[in-house]
Every structure is written in structure tokens, then in C-alpha cells.
Image (spheres, rainbow, N blue to C red):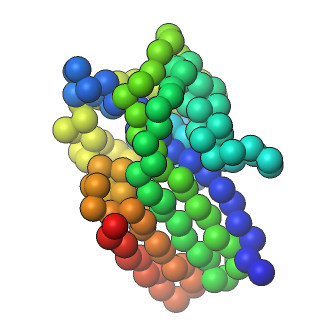
Amino acid sequence: MENVILTNMCMVEDVVNNKVLVLNRAKGNWRGIVFPGGHVEQGESIIDSTIREIKEETGLTIKNLKACGIKNWYDEDKNLRYIVFQFKTSDFEGDLIESTHEGEVFWTDKDNIRNLTSPKGFEMNLEVILNDDINECYIIKNEEKTEWQYHLK
């Protein structure tokens, strides 16, 4: 049986100002502009983990999350599946923390998100979150090749 890592990511949107909240990750091997999120803890629900991670990384309390789909990959060499449950919401409150142990947090124009410096693979997260016709990005990875595909709703 494969090993599984469960994570989440959420696009928090200020629809009035056409802004989205981003995190400039400064640690780990996935550095650059991303939406906030993190790992699901043992026994924790996916939604609760997303709400907790957004609070920890941004200071904001979110609710009314809309599931957008998943990005997941299977690493054949490690027998590992990594699943990212992706959400979006425009329902938030609280005071923004501008910097955490993860990096700098800030609002940016939604229309400019694709032009920012993001880690390799984040564009796949964007496709699932921003495109209502896509609900999954699946990647198969091994030493010889990496294949990816989108699944339509």
C-alpha cells in the first residue's frame, strides 16, 4: 500500500478589491508565491485543517469554504501519494499577520497572480482553483519521467 500525505491550500479573495491573499514562502523546498495552507493533522477534518492553517499563516479566520478540487501526485520511486485539497473563500475576518515563520503574507491583484514568482508546480494549483471546469490535477512522477493531466468535471 502507498504512503499518503494530506495537505490543503486556500485562495482567500477580497472580491470588492479584486485581490487575493498570498504567502511568499521563505522556507522549505517549495519557495515563492503561493496560497496559504498546510498539512492535515492526524484525526483532523480537511475543512478544519484548512481553517486552522489559514489562521496560523495569516491571522484571518475563514469560513464558507468552496471546494475547488485536488492536486495530487504519486511518486513511484518513493511509493508516496501527496494530496492537496484546494479551496477558495471570500468570507474572512480578523487582522492580517504580515509575516510568519512561513514567510511574508500580503494581498495582490488577482489578475496578476500568474505573473508572480511561484514554485514549480504552483501553476497546476492555480488551474484547479481558478478554472471551474477542472477538478483534479494528477501527476505521476518517477526517475525517468513526470506525467501530468487535468481531469474535467
Q: Is residue 122 visible?
A: no
From the top left corner, tell me how far across and down residue 118 is, in percent.
Answer: 38, 48
Location of residue 113 with respect to 132 vertically, above or below: above
The residue at 39%/62% (across/down) is: 135
Nearest the eye: 68 or 83: 68
Location of residue 150 with respect to 67 vertically, above or below: below
Residue 13 placement, left or right of 93 = left
Nearest the eye: 26 or 33: 33
Residue 19 placement, left or right of 146 = left
**Where, quadrant-wise, is the C terminus in this rendering?**
bottom left
The residue at 69%/60% (across/down) is: 5
From the top left corner, tell me how far across and down residue 35 is, in percent.
Answer: 44, 40
Please, which residue is most extreme toward the bottom here? 144
From the top left corner, tell me how far across and down residue 68 is, in percent.
Answer: 41, 51
How many numbered marks are there?
A: 0
The residue at 47%/32% (across/down) is: 64
The residue at 45%/21% (across/down) is: 92
Q: On the image, which quarter does residue 1 sit in?
A: bottom right
Q: Is residue 151 visible?
A: yes
Please, which residue is most extreme toward the top here? 95
Location of residue 86 with respect to 16 vertically, above or below: below
From the top left corner, tell me how far across and down residue 75 is, in percent.
Answer: 61, 76
